[in-house]
Image (cartoon, helix red, strand yellow):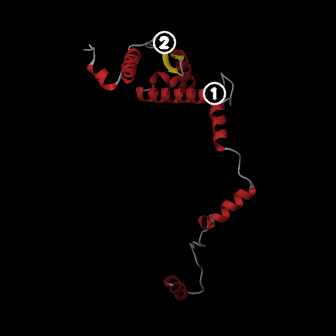
Amino acid sequence: MKATLLPALDLLGHGIAWLALAMLLLATAAACGHRQALPGPDVAAVVGGAQIPYQEFQLYLTRTLGDAETGAGSDVLSQLLDQYLEERLMLRLAVDRGLVPAGGAPRQAIDALLRQAAGPPPSAAEIAEQYRRHRQDFARPERVRLRQILTEDRRTAERDRRD
């Protein structure tokens, strides 16, 4: 009689069972694996693995708000942090796409991304074709808005007003 540690191993077959056991061990090891260290207290955010010091965000606030920074509420500061991080993310994207050099200005990155997304401007023939296909969208009925009509007598004016 054959002794087995796990009866299920015999049912599944040795190859499948060992594969399942190996996968379970790998999953367990991954769950207990290396955890990333928390950023330091002077870090405002981490973008793409790069830590953004709080001092950089403080400079952004000073440039954006000037002297009004001290009176800004938490909702304003939260929105400005979101805006700052979005600008940094767009700068990172533009650098990754090779549109701007590393360390470029966020405004340059945003402009470069918009130019890339827009593509080349349409040709005159493409514009004419678009107009031809959508002519009804550009059609406007003729209208006249009259504020004053001069007539020779009151009876003519009242008749014209009714019509």
Q: Residue furthest bottom?
A: 155
The residue drawn where x is 57% and y is 26% is: 88
- Residue 151: percent from left, percent from top: 59, 83
Q: Residue furthest front?
A: 1
- Residue 111: percent from left, percent from top: 65, 36
Q: Is residue 151 above or below residue 78?
A: below
Q: Mark number for residue 51?
A: none
Closer to the camera, 88 or 150?
Answer: 88
Q: Amino acid at mark 2?
A: Asp
Please state if 88 lies on the left or on the right of 14 as rendered. right
Please state if 119 lies on the left or on the right of 42 as rendered. right
Q: Is residue 29 above or below residue 69?
A: above
Residue under label 2: 42
Report crowding for label 1: few under 14, some 14 to 19, many 20 or more residues within 10 A (C-alpha).
few
The residue drawn where x is 74% and y is 58% is: 125
Query: Quadrant location of the N terminus?
Result: top left
Q: Quadrant of residue 92?
A: top right
Q: Is residue 28 above or below residue 161?
A: above
Report crowding for label 2: few under 14, some 14 to 19, many 20 or more residues within 10 A (C-alpha).
few
Q: Quadrant of residue 97?
A: top right
- Residue 118: percent from left, percent from top: 65, 44
Q: Nearer the viewer, mark 1 or mark 2?
A: 1
Q: Amino acid at mark 1?
A: Asp
Mark 1 or mark 2: whose residue is earlier in sequence: 2
Residue under label 1: 96
